[in-house]
């Protein structure tokens, strides 16, 4: 096993942790912009988030390539096998960093899902407000051909049946 490739993998894991930490901050900024309904701030946060996602994608590709060069599969099993091949101290250090990386990934997923829920809730509220302003109430709702909610109240009595 190449010591240089192992050190490269370790450096890529640390870089991944830093990228996820930055992404968490961007997701927090995105959440603030969504809640404040600040379109300029949201556009900026989304652009920076996209850049970070591209960097994370590159980091993952480089980590996978390094594992392949080490003769391992680019998967959780490949990392476990790498850990089993290392001396005790470096293996413990790498395992600790790998766990930080996976924890950061889970935190980013949760933050992203939270932002998505906020957007969906805001959209529902806005849709309800628009419907009220248009004189439509939720009582006249029927599903349309696409399975989405439609308004059937203006239809004739025969159409309602």
Image (cartoon, rainbow, N blue to C red):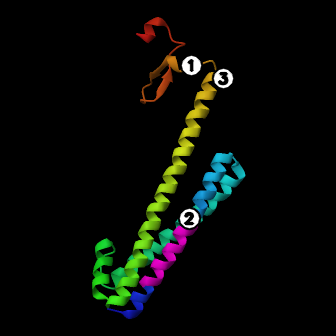
| Residue 58 in picture, x, y percent from top left | 49, 72
Q: Residue at x 49, y 79 (%)?
A: 14
Q: Secondary structure at mark 3?
A: helix
Q: Give me the disc on residue 137.
A: 1
Q: Residue at x 44, y 24 (%)?
A: 144
Q: Nearer the viewer, residue 3 or 105?
A: 105
Q: Residue at x 56, y 19 (%)?
A: 137
Q: Give me the disc on residue 118.
A: none
Q: Quadrant of the N terminus?
A: bottom left
| Residue 138 in picture, x, y percent from top left | 53, 21
Counting residues from the start of the chain, the first of labels 2 and 1 encountered is 2
In this image, 108 relative to 64: left or right?
right
Residue holding disc 2: 23
Q: Residue at x 28, y 74 (%)?
A: 77
Q: Give me the disc on residue 133.
A: 3
Q: Nearer the viewer, residue 51 or 82?
A: 82
């Amino acid at each position: 096993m190449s010591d240089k490739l192992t050190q490269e993998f370790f450096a890529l894991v640390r870089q991944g942790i830093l990228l996820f930490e930055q992404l968490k901050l961007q997701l927090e900024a995105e959440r603030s912009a969504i809640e404040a309904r600040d379109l300029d701030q949201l556009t900026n946060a989304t652009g920076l988030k996209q850049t970070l996602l591209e960097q994370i994608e590159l980091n993952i590709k480089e980590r996978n390539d390094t594992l392949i060069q080490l003769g391992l599969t680019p998967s959780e099993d490949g990392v476990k096998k790498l850990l089993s091949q290392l001396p005790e101290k470096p293996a413990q250090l790498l395992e600790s960093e790998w766990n930080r990386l996976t924890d950061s990934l889970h935190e980013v997923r949760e933050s992203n899902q939270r932002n998505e829920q906020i957007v969906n809730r805001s959209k529902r509220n806005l849709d309800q407000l628009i419907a009220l302003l248009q004189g439509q109430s939720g009582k006249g709702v029927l599903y349309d051909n696409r399975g989405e909610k439609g308004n059937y109240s203006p239809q004739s009595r025969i159409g309602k049946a």
